[in-house]
Amino acid sequence: EEKKSISFVEQFVEEDLANGKNGGKIQTRFPPEPNGYLHIGHAKAICMDFGVAETYNGVCNLRFDDTNPSKENNEYVENILNDIKWLGFKWGNIYYASDYFEKLWDFAVWMIKKGYAYVDQQTSEDIASQKGTPTTPGTPSPFRDRPVEENLDLFEKMNTPEAVEGSMVLRAKLDMANPNMHFRDPIMYRIIQTSHHRTGTKWHCYPMYDFAHGQSDYFEGVTHSICTLEFVPHRPLYDKFVDLLKEYDETGIKGDMHDNRPRQIEFNRLNLTYTVMSKRKLHTLVDENLVNGWDDPRMPTLCGMRRRGYSPESIRMFINSIGYTKFDALNDMALLEASVREDLNKKAIRVSAVLDPVKLVITNYPDNQTEEMDAINNPENETAGSHKIIFTKNLWIERADFMEDAPKKFFRMTPGKEVRLKNAYIIKCTGCTKDAEGNIVEIQAEYDPESKSGMEGANRKVKGTLHWVSVDHCQKAEIREYDRLFNIENPSADERDFRELLNPDSLKIYNNCYVENYAATLLHGEYLQFQRTGYFIADPDSTTEHVVYNKTVGLKDTWAK
Ligand code: ATP
Ligand code: MG
Ligand code: MG
């Protein structure tokens, strides 16, 4: 097998292993905030976090980064677990940042006692206005030098039900002139009076990301804390808090932490054309009913893609193909679709479905005769076997497969010309019938009884092959076809409100489709290819009376094959 090329992330990991760091142990984590559903961007982080652990015989844990109760809940936790499993990854342990609230509190108290932290009672606006710029120093808070006892007392008060949100914050006393803005006395704790999904109303103030993440990594023994590029400027602060935590640990106040030094490594986020990835925007789409929920097949969420019919393998293949770099980029949705096609080509069961039907009558075929034809399930996979499709006198074919006055290069059906019916006979079109308005209501053809697939008469050259279903052996179906969710390539870079950029025609419903009976039994997540049309999957809205399919993606080239 060809050796997979490794990214700079794995290079760092190998370097650390070679230097004997962490006793040769590798431990990573995937740290979702349970405030929304996972999207394809998260899949990129998941593939990296779990991939590194897998490659170097380590372990990857899940850590729910649940430090802001106002937006988090258990529904999100459950769905995140489900999506990671679906992608095909196995975690070691499940941790929650909220498991460390007690330890973090004690550490914060220690920092106050050491003179490393203070309670600021200014408004957030005032605090922001004192930050300065990267080239000019900030202004120290008037509360910066208040006595330790006062700080301890106020910190206790921050954690009471009476504490008013926004009235106080705990800040680290670091360096108001540091060129790294994150060092200008960053906020460690803020008051939030919302019940937490795990700790209820036990806490009234909560640690900020920067005061929770590195410490959580340290508590768990994470060796490599892999994240996205926006955290590069946070890294010195991440390291600083770990340094302080080690200092705290050595004082013996809390002696249960092991000797570990997590290393933060950053890679570029995944951005995709014609969609958005920000959770805030995805929430808006759902909350304002601009899509039909988080699992709407147009959404970039993993549950949306699953419902759309994308396979987990195709998503992983795509992530692998774009790779990991130090530069943010916009990846082409077409590349993702190519991976989906490539994977589904190997997996999908071939069935027949007619989306825009018109009746075809085989005039020389006996009225009540039925014939079982063999239909191969997947030409790419012999073990997939075959199924029967029933041929009769009256068939449905696609309206677009017939043209009364056709140009020379039209290889579908036109009077006087032969076409092949997939898995069945060669037929010659003899004419059509129209209604008063001139719409074609029926097409007639004659079949050649010696031309059935497998017979000698089947071997003559006929350009077009059409799919069909028997009028008496099919099921009516609803088919949902999706287009890009947004009309423009990079909605996030546009100045207009992103709602204005939505594609109004992103969902097209075909209500009058027919699928062969076999297809109507494949309602449990089987990947399907509707011959000549594209890849499809049954939607969970399907019932035995009313089957619904989602179009996953079209075939690359509809007519050439
Ligand atoms: P948002 O910023 O929209 O709120 P988030 O990035 O904060 O989303 P989290 O649940 O905190 O969402 O993310 C969990 C992990 O997934 C983080 O390590 C984050 O870096 C990573 N991640 C999120 N979005 C992407 C993306 N588009 N590409 C790669 N990794 C991502
Ligand atoms: Mg986040
Ligand atoms: Mg974020």
Image (spheres, grey):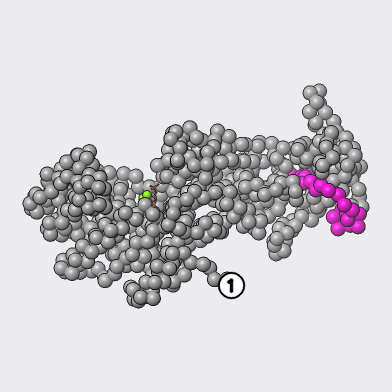
Q: Is residue 418 left or right of residue 136?
A: right
Depth check, front residue: 239 or 460: 239
Q: Provide residue 189's location: percent of width, then percent of height.
A: 22, 50
Residue at 27 percent across and 44 percent down: it is 194
469 is within the stretch colored magenta: yes
Q: Provide residue 537's location: percent of width, then percent of height.
A: 62, 49
* Residue 427 location, quadrant: top right
Question: In which quadrant of the rendered image does the N terminus lie?
Answer: bottom right
Q: Which segment did they paint magenta?
A: 452-474
Q: Provide residue 481's location: percent of width, then percent of height.
A: 62, 41
User: Residue at label 1?
Assistant: 1
Residue at 57 percent across and 71 percent down: it is 2
- Tell me the element at label 1: loop
Q: Is residue 103 left or right of residue 288?
A: left
- Spot the residue most to the front: 135
Magenta stretch: dominant secondary structure: loop
Label 1 neighbour load within 10 Å: few <14, some 14-19, many 20+:
few
281 is within the stretch colored magenta: no
